[in-house]
Image: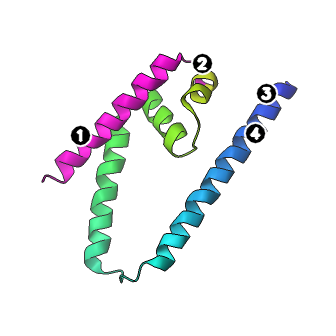
Amino acid sequence: MFTVAANLATDHLRVEGRRLQILERAADEHFLTTEEITPERIASGRSELSWVVEALGRMPARQRRVLLLYHLNGQTQREIACQLGLGLSTVRADLKSAIGALVDARRRAMPS
């Protein structure tokens, strides 16, 4: 029970640390850009966000979770495998499929 509690606390700290890094990076980039927020940029941002959300919604739940744990929470593939009770090769396959789905969705949304 104590091990589970310790693992949960460690996971929480890792997630919060990753969120802070992302927010700090975003704040730095915000202050470095001198471009104005225009209606065109807002529309473009919403368009890009919509295809990402749609692609994530079409993914199987486990695949989406693996992608988010890896890219958003910054966990390693091995950590994800242990946390979800999956084999490392399954995590790798899910991650590869999820990234492929996002690439395909981007190609459909923004043809060259």
Which badge, 3 or 2, comes first in the chain's sequence? Answer: 3
32 is higher (above) or lower (below) than 90: below
Point 79% across, 27% down: residue: 4
Nearer the observer, disc 1 or disc 3? 1
Residue 67, image x, y percentages: 46, 37
Residue at label 1?
104
The three-letter amino acid code for the residue at tag 4 is: Thr
Q: CA distance from mark 3 to mark 2?
A: 14 Å
The three-letter amino acid code for the residue at tag 1 is: Asp
Q: CA distance from mark 2 to mark 4?
A: 18 Å
Q: CA distance from mark 1 to mark 4?
A: 35 Å
Tag 1 near tag 2, CB within 8 Å: no
Magenta stretch: residue 85 in it?
Answer: yes
Range of residues picked out in magenta: 84-112
Residue at label 4?
10
Q: CA distance from mark 1 to mark 2?
A: 28 Å
Which badge, 1 or 3, comes first in the chain's sequence? Answer: 3
Quadrant assignment, res 55 = top left
Nearer the observer, disc 3 or disc 4? 4
Q: CA distance from mark 3 to mark 4?
A: 10 Å
Point 67% across, 52% down: residue: 17
104 is higher (above) or lower (below) than 35: above
Residue at label 2?
85
Magenta stretch: residue 13 in it?
Answer: no
Q: Is residue 17 left or right of residue 94?
A: right
Residue 20, image x, y percentages: 64, 59
At label 1, counting other C-alpha atoms closer than 10 Å, the crowd grade (few under 14, some 14-19, many 20 or more) is few
